[in-house]
Image (spheres, rainbow, N blue to C red):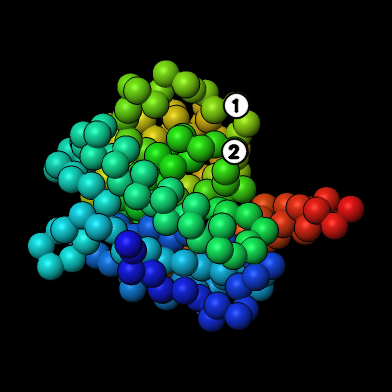
């Protein structure tokens, strides 16, 4: 069971697009709630708390200083998110689902996309990386490139060069990539990036959601 912060009360969620928001290592669901006001109308944000303990805070799976992780732990974390997501979708009437992840949360979002590439309309990755995983790579490239926004500072000291090179290669080969860099931002999210994320979501999520509603009603 996840602790979840919602951007809208339950009565306002039906008929909207669900954006699942995944925080970084050593934080919690409150760290991304500041993005709620920037979400375009028609998109409901759900910021989840990871279940892996990191001191007094949280993450999604164990991460070493080189950003390496065990396949079993990553897949277990993904299974937990899917279990929550399947239940939420069964209970509600969301028009579709997209993902947003910061730092390790981007790695989590990437893993979810790799496991169910047809389940998500778009993905936003902020100051993060894609995990190296030989098991998942066996089924790649993904069958249909999903729109993916990748924002970062080139001088972000947290994400090492090897992780950046792997992430860039994977995103180029598997997604419809929109890549942006923000000098001086560091390992963080700044106002300019938030603006670009909002534009990305309006461009790639809302038209798709409107089409899906028309198709269902037709």
Picture coordinates of residue 4, whole percent (x, y)? 38, 69
Q: Decide: few, some or many residues near mark 1? Use Cα within 10 Å; few <14, some 14-19, many ≥20.
A: few
> Considering the image in quadrants, where does the N terminus appear?
bottom left
* Quarter holding residue 70: top left
Q: In this view, does 166 lie above or below 106?
A: above
Circle 1: element type: loop
76 relative to 16 in the view: left or right: left
Is residue 65 at all visible to an observer of this figure?
A: yes
With 62 as the anchor, is 43 left or right in this view? right
Residue 165, percent from left and from top: 36, 31
Q: In which quarter of the image is residue 190?
A: bottom left
- In the image, residue 128 lies at what x, y percent? 35, 48
Question: Which label belongs to residue 159?
Answer: none
Taking depth in this image into account, of 119 and 142 the one nearest to the observer is: 119
Please give the name of the residue rendered at 21% of the width and 61% of the height, measured from the top-left corner. 58
- The residue shown at (30%, 46%) is 77
What mark, if any, has residue 143 been given in the picture?
A: 1
Residue sitting at the far right: 218
Name the residue: 47% across, 74% down.
6
Rendered position, 59 above or below 117: below
Lateral position of residue 16 relative to residue 49, left or right: right
| Residue sitting nearer the eye, 178 or 208 | 208
C-alpha separation, residue under disc 2 versus residue under disc 1: 9 Å
Q: Name the residue under label 2.
A: 118
Residue at the far left: name it: 55
Residue 157 visible to an observer of this rendering: no
Q: Do the residues labelled 2 and 1 touch (CB within 8 Å)?
A: yes
For residue 199, above or below residue 144: below
Q: Quadrant of residue 89?
A: bottom right
Within 10 Å of disc 2 (Cα), the crowding (few <14, some 14-19, many 20+) is few
């Amino acid at each position: 069971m996840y602790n979840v912060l919602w951007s809208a009360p339950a009565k306002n969620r039906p008929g909207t697009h669900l954006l699942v928001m995944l925080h970084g290592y050593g934080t919690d669901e409150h760290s991304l709630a500041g993005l709620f006001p920037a979400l375009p109308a028609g998109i409901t944000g759900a910021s989840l708390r990871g279940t892996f303990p990191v001191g007094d805070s949280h993450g999604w799976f164990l991460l070493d200083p080189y950003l390496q992780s065990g396949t079993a732990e990553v897949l277990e974390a993904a299974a937990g998110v899917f279990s929550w997501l399947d239940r939420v979708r069964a209970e509600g009437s969301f028009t579709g689902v997209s993902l947003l992840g910061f730092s390790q949360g981007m790695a989590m979002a990437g893993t979810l996309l790799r496991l169910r590439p047809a389940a998500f309309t778009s993905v936003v990755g902020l100051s993060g990386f894609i995990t190296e995983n030989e098991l998942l790579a066996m089924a790649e490239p993904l069958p249909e490139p999903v729109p993916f926004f990748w924002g970062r500072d080139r001088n972000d000291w947290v994400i090492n060069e090897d992780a950046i090179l792997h992430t860039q290669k994977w995103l180029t080969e598997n997604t419809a990539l929109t890549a942006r860099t923000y000098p001086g931002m560091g390992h963080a999210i700044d106002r300019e990036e938030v603006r670009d994320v909002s534009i990305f979501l309006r461009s790639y999520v809302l038209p798709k959601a409107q089409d899906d509603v028309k198709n269902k009603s037709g």
